[in-house]
């Protein structure tokens, strides 16, 4: 039996593009988990999408290769040759939007730079950057966490890893905001093309420069892989570099911003961390679970018509995993709406699951832990410097992060 939509009442209650949902999606997620955990809706651009909200169902989708990442795998080779629309954009030439075997090849070229051991080697430099940023602010007595701290820290780190001039970081942020916030958000689509072209133009100049003058950085390593052939095509080179620049900072920006807000809203938990900084490891995992930096997984499509949890999902329809919903599922987490920096059983999905598990997870965890520890040590009386009701969240259905977070100390 085919089940598509839920009751009319339920449909009216769920508007994933509303400002109310953007500000606080958790009541809606709770309702969907209870009443219609695999929920079919019409997106703002008119396409149907299935929203998966329960933890176990989310894990099933993330690990099931029938839900494909590369939409061109939905059509025949002949259609790919004759249909201009089947050409992949720059981000589609990345591991994020590839299926096996391409995914394994693309990920293998990059993952050596992101092993826990390699990332741990960056600890000293990340601590130095963190303290430099706070040195410039300490005497002010106030700052805006996102612009002054949460954004510059990870973008400086990823720029240094890649060999990108860090003075260009504000330009990256502008491009990145446009590209991320346009995800399943038609209101932002008109801004995308111009910024995308400018971003790709910048990457082109960067790669051209590194071809002539290789350095000991990740871009030079990727160019060598591309020039050796059969490992990385030129479109894939552009795609991987673009993905690393954007994904290399976006998650950490939101982890830091959302985590600081969670502590400001829960002073008892902040006090625990100040008294016992050795609890930071579990605290970071709890920040990732409680109000995770990635609200929805990136797009998947049903590679075939399939039955899933009592619903029939037609081939080619969009499937989105609500990661932040899964991480508040009471069937998986005790007291899921409570922030507990000592939580032990915490198998959250903030970094995904399966073959597409976030490559940058060790880096985000390290940056987040250093950021929180340093901030609480140097600015122990940290407090919100605005009305909590005035805080605004970024639009779009991918990242969950604040536009600004003013604090005083």
Image (cartoon, rainbow, N blue to C red):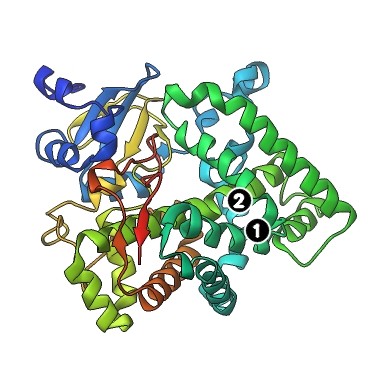
Q: Foreground: 286 or 112?
A: 286
To which residue does mark 1 refer?
Answer: 159
Secondary structure category for the residue under label 1: helix
Rounded to the nearest whole Å, what is the CA distance between mark 1 and mark 2?
A: 7 Å
Q: Residue at x 34, y 44 (%)?
A: 295
Q: Residue at x 37, y 36 (%)?
A: 397
Q: Residue at x 41, y 65 (%)?
A: 141
Crowding near the residue tagged with mark 2, few <14, some 14–19, many ≥20 C-alpha atoms within 10 Å: many
Q: Is residue 85 above or below residue 292?
A: above
Q: Is any atom of residue 193 visible in this view? A: yes
Q: Quadrant of the N terminus?
A: top left
Q: Which mark is residue 245?
A: 2
Q: Is any atom of residue 251 visible in this view? A: no
Residue 275 horizontal/vertical position (percent):
25, 83
Q: Is residue 15 left or right of residue 63?
A: left
Secondary structure category for the residue under label 2: helix
Crowding near the residue tagged with mark 1, few <14, some 14–19, many ≥20 C-alpha atoms within 10 Å: many
Q: Quadrant of the C terminus?
A: bottom left
Q: Which image quadrant for residue 350?
A: bottom left
Q: Earlier in the sequence, mark 1 or mark 2?
A: 1
Residue 96 horizontal/vertical position (percent):
52, 45
Q: Residue at x 38, y 35 (%)?
A: 395
Tell whether label 2 touches label 1 (CB within 8 Å).
yes
Q: Which image quadrant for residue 186?
A: top left
Q: Foreground: 64 or 300?
A: 300
Q: Is residue 14 above or below residue 136?
A: above
Q: Is residue 179 above or below residue 405?
A: above
Q: Is residue 294 left or right of residue 158?
A: left
């Amino acid at each position: 039996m085919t089940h598509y939509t839920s009751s009319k009442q339920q449909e009216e209650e769920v508007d994933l593009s509303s400002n109310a949902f953007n500000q606080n999606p958790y009541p809606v997620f709770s309702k969907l988990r209870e009443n219609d955990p695999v929920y079919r809706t019409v997106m703002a651009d008119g396409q149907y999408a299935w929203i998966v909200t329960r933890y176990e169902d989310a894990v099933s989708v993330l690990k099931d290769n029938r839900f494909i990442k590369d939409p061109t795998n939905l059509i025949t080779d002949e259609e790919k040759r004759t249909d201009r629309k089947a050409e992949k954009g720059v981000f589609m030439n990345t591991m994020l939007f590839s299926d096996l075997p391409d995914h394994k090849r693309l990920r293998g070229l990059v993952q050596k730079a992101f092993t826990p051991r390699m990332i741990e080697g960056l600890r000293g430099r990340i601590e130095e950057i963190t303290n430099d940023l706070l040195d410039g602010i300490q005497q002010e007595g106030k700052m805006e966490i996102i612009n002054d701290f949460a954004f510059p820290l990870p973008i400086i780190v990823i720029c240094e890893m890649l060999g990108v001039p860090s003075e260009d970081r504000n330009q990256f942020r502008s491009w990145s905001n446009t590209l991320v916030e346009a995800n399943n958000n038609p209101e932002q689509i008109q801004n995308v093309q111009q910024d995308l072209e400018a971003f790709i133009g910048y990457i082109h100049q960067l790669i051209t420069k590194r071809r002539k003058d290789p350095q000991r950085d990740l871009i030079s390593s990727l160019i060598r892989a591309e020039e050796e052939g059969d490992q990385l095509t030129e479109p894939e080179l552009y795609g991987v570099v673009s993905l690393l620049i954007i994904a290399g900072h976006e998650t950490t920006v939101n982890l830091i911003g959302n985590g600081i807000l969670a502590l400001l809203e829960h002073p008892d938990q902040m006090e625990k961390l100040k008294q016992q900084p050795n609890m930071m490891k579990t605290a970071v995992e709890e920040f990732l679970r409680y109000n995770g930096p990635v609200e929805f997984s990136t797009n998947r499509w049903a590679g075939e018509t399939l039955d899933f949890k009592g619903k029939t999902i037609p081939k080619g329809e969009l499937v989105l995993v609500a990661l932040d919903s899964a991480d508040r599922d009471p069937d998986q987490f005790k007291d899921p709406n409570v922030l507990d920096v000592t939580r032990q059983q915490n198998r959250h999905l903030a970094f995904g699951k399966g073959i597409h598990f976030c490559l940058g997870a060790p880096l985000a965890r390290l940056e987040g832990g250093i950021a929180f520890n340093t901030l609480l040590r140097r600015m122990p009386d940290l407090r919100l410097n605005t009305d909590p009701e005035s805080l605004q969240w970024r639009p779009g259905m991918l990242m969950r992060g604040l536009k600004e977070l003013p604090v005083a100390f």
